[in-house]
Image (spheres, helix red, strand yellow):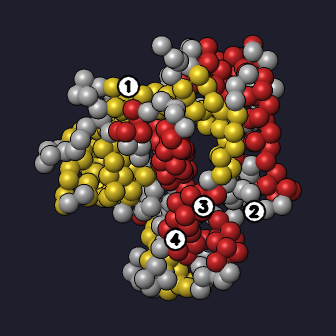
Amino acid sequence: MSKEKVVVGMSGGVDSSVAAWLLKEQGYEVIGVTMQIWQDEDTSTQEENGGCCGLSAVEDARRVAWDLGIPYHVMNFKQEFQSQVIDYFMDEYERGRTPNPCIACNRYVKWESLLKRSLAIGANYIATGHYAQIDKLPNGRYALKKSVTAAKDQTYALYNLTQDQLSHTLMPVGAYSKDQIRELAEKIELKVANKPDSQEICFIPDNDYAGFIEESRGQKLPEGNFVDLDGQIIGRHKGITHYTVGQRKGLNLSMGHPVFVVEIRPETNEVVIGKGEDVFSSTLRASQINWMAIDGLHGEKRRVLAKIRYSHKGAKCTITEVENGVVECKFDEPQRAITPGQAVVFYEDDYVVGGGTIL
């Protein structure tokens, strides 16, 4: 019987490099692939801005593949990345929402596009270096399970994967801690063993989101009014792409007490300002729900732990379907800065039940 073939998405980092080694050790026929999304820019721009898919990522991944003795390819995903990630990112900010481009990239580029091409070349699976695990549950559905290391768990950013995608995915790193992965990399003498993790959004390395959007669009969004909760004008803002719910820094408002962004209203070009307590809420609604461990609520209420951002520890809540495709989440305790455009992900016993986009 021939060995099963797996395409490993290699970013040139230690996690995906060790993932490739682990799968080879387990007997899979491993092919390394880096998804190239920066190929129109000059070399220095690619080097500086590429993040997990830039020029240095390609060189590091190619070197690791050579050391592991596996075939290696670079696949061009520029078009998919532009339409599914960058355009989505800019559109959401211009609508007064705060998107999560990594979730979109995972769902539509790293999985939908890479998996399609991988299956087309005869692969059985794709694999990544994400800190998450995949189980097939007694009800027959595939679900993500938190990695063994809570500090690095990446299930939040993967909640949107479909059942078909999960059935064709391997995540060998999820059974290890970050320290164990680095130790394995040193043991097998990988040159990327101590390479630092990528932190920022790969296509905006300086974190100036508004500047990126203005440069890409070729125009600035208009300035508008800061208003308080009663609608009184209290100042001028630089354009809604500069702000997100819960933000305190960069407002330049002298109110005699700390103030925060409570709401963004793109239809009137207003940014609503309030006090710290005004940023807390007990309820959210979410749409574009992707169910994972279950196939829906079917009219029932369900107790879950919900995370409203990647760094959120999670909070207990009750979820119900309030209208077609929209889920309401009522928290036991008010949560800070529930942000439209971000993901809310529901957990039960370390498994991802599902998730959606906060309205």
Vertical placement of residue 355 versus 4, above or below: below
**Total numbered circles:** 4
For image coordinates 49% across by 52% down, the residue present is: 108
Q: CA distance from mark 1 to mark 3?
A: 32 Å
The residue labelled by disc 1 is 135
Label 2: how many Cα within 10 Å (few below 14, some 14–19, many 20+): few
Mark 4 residue element: helix
Earlier in the chain: of badge 1 and badge 3, it is 3
Residue lying farthest front? 1
Q: CA distance from mark 4 to mark 1?
A: 35 Å
Residue type highlighted by circle 4: Asp
Earlier in the chain: of badge 3 and badge 2, it is 2
For image coordinates 57% across by 14% down, the residue present is: 27
Residue type highlighted by circle 2: Asp
4 and 3 marks in contact (CB < 8 Å): no
Earlier in the chain: of badge 4 and badge 1, it is 4
Q: CA distance from mark 3 to mark 2?
A: 11 Å
The residue labelled by disc 2 is 40
Label 4: how many Cα within 10 Å (few below 14, some 14–19, many 20+): some
The answer to which quarter of the image holds residue 67 is top right
Earlier in the chain: of badge 1 and badge 2, it is 2
Earlier in the chain: of badge 4 and badge 2, it is 2
Vertical placement of residue 29 versus 103, above or below: above
Mark 2 residue element: loop
The circle drawn on residue 216 is none
Q: Nearer the viewer, residue 10 or 49?
A: 10
The residue labelled by disc 3 is 79
237 on left or right of 246: right
- Between circles 1 and 3, the one closer to the viewer is 3
For image coordinates 42% across by 43% down, the residue present is: 161
The residue labelled by disc 4 is 91
